[in-house]
């Protein structure tokens, strides 16, 4: 368990959205792995890096796998505002996703 600042992944769906099981079928893990690989490659090419790349600090479970939280929201897609980030952030806060050391990335599908 890491107590440092890290990124926590949330697979977030509206009340009426189809669940494509991205949290359990490996799709999100594939996307995040590719993102982290690209970050490592890009940072290793920086002139000041000396060829040493860096990765994002991801929130991992005790078994070392990516920790992905599934959330089914209380509103349908039609009930959400056109640009729902402010609502989603308030929803997460209200539902105790308040760890200041965990920045959340949420997929709204």
Image (cartoon, grey):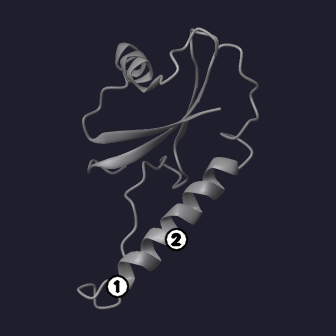
Q: What is the crowding at mark 2: few (fewer than 14 residues within 10 Å), some, or many (at least 20)?
A: some
Q: Closer to the N terminus: mark 1 or mark 2?
A: 2
- Give how far across and how far down residue 24 sits, in percent: 70, 41
Which residue is depicted at the point 26% across and 41% down?
101
From this view, report whether residue 56 is shown above or below residue 46: above
Q: Observer-nearest residue: 18 or 61? A: 18
Residue 16, quarter of picture: top right
Residue 102, quarter of picture: top left
Determine which of the numbered discs, if any, sits on residue 52 in the image.
Answer: 1
- Give how far across and how far down residue 57 sits, in percent: 37, 57
| Apparent side of residue 74 relative to residue 94 in the rendered image (left or right) | right
Q: Which residue is mark 2?
A: 37
Which residue is depicted at the point 43% across and 42% down?
8
Which residue is depicted at the point 43% across and 74% down?
40
Q: Observer-nearest residue: 26 or 20? A: 20
Q: Observer-nearest residue: 108 or 4? A: 108
From this view, report whether residue 76 is shown above or below residue 57: above
């Amino acid at each position: 368990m890491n107590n440092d600042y890290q990124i926590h992944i949330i697979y977030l769906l509206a009340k009426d959205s189809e669940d494509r099981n991205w949290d359990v079928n490996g799709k999100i893990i594939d996307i995040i792995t590719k993102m982290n690989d690209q970050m490592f490659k890009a940072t290793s090419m920086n002139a000041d890096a000396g060829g040493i790349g860096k990765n994002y600090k991801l929130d991992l479970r005790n078994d070392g796998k990516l920790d992905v939280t599934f959330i089914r929201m209380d509103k349908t897609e039609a009930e959400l505002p056109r640009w729902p980030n402010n609502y989603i952030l308030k929803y997460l806060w209200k539902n105790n996703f308040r760890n200041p050391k965990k920045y959340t990335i949420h997929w709204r599908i």
